[in-house]
Every structure is written in structure tokens, then in C-alpha cells.
Image (cartoon, rainbow, N blue to C red):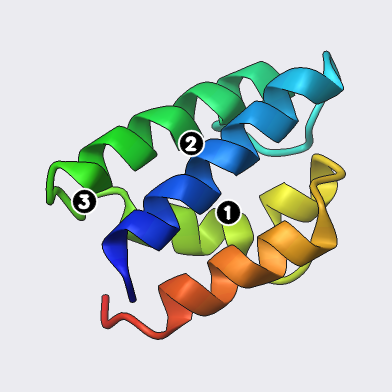
């Protein structure tokens, strides 16, 4: 996984969630798109600094039929991030 490719994709995902506006999500941790956007932006910054602690949670968010899909995120972007995270060991 190219770290900066993942960072850029996560920043795009955060911007997408922010631009889509308010919506209630069914997830316990991220009950609205804004909270999800904040987490994605924070995770991107951490990964850019070499901190991979957020990757397990990102795998959960971008797993098929999970948080990203519930938030009506772009299928193309979600699948791209899922592939990036799936190629890297936990």
C-alpha cells in the first residue's frame, strides 16, 4: 500500500462525508456523517505521520456493507480504500 495514496483517499472520503451533510447513521461510534468525516481526516493525518493505529477501525468502516455504505459513501472510493487496506497486513 502506498501510504500517501491511502492518505489522499481518506481525505477525499472525509471531504465527501462532510459535503453530503447531516444524516443519521446506524453505527454506534459514528452516528452521523460529521463524526465519520472527523475520524477519517484524523486517521489520514495519523497515517501520514506513520501511525497505523487507525487501520483496524478503517478496515471495519470500509468493509463491504458496513459504515461507509450506510453513510451513502461513493462505492468507487469505498472499494478503492477497502482494497488498499486489504493489501496491508493488520
Mark 3 lies on residue: 53
**Picture coordinates of residue 53 (x, y %)?**
21, 51
Task: Look at the picture and state if 36 lies above or below 68.
Answer: above
Q: Quadrant of the C terminus?
A: bottom left
Q: CA distance from mark 2 to mark 3?
A: 13 Å
Counting residues from the start of the chain, the first of labels 1 and 3 encountered is 3
Q: Quadrant of the N terminus?
A: bottom left
Task: Look at the picture and state if 57 lies above or below 65.
Answer: above
Asked if disc 1 and disc 2 are in contact, CB closer than 8 Å, the reply is yes
- Please tell me which residue lies in front, 47 or 25: 47
Q: CA distance from mark 1 to mark 2?
A: 10 Å
Mark 1 lies on residue: 61
- Please tell me which residue lies in front, 4 or 67: 4
**Picture coordinates of residue 86 (x, y %)?**
45, 81
Q: CA distance from mark 1 to mark 3?
A: 14 Å
**Residue at figure coordinates x 83%, y 14% from the top left:** 22
**Residue at figure coordinates x 48%, y 64% from the top left:** 59
**Residue at figure coordinates x 47%, y 74% from the top left:** 84
Q: Which mark is residue 40?
A: 2
**Picture coordinates of residue 76 (x, y %)?**
78, 65
Q: Secondary structure at mark 3?
A: loop
Q: Secondary structure at mark 2?
A: helix
Amino acid at each position: 500500500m502506498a501510504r500517501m495514496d491511502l492518505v489522499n483517499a481518506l481525505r477525499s472520503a472525509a471531504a465527501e462525508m462532510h459535503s453530503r451533510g447531516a444524516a443519521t447513521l446506524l453505527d454506534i461510534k459514528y452516528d452521523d456523517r460529521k463524526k465519520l468525516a472527523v475520524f477519517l481526516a484524523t486517521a489520514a493525518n495519523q497515517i501520514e505521520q506513520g501511525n497505523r493505529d487507525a487501520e483496524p477501525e478503517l478496515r471495519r468502516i470500509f468493509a463491504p456493507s458496513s459504515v461507509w455504505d450506510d453513510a451513502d459513501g461513493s462505492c468507487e472510493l469505498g472499494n478503492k480504500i477497502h482494497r488498499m487496506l486489504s493489501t496491508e497486513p493488520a
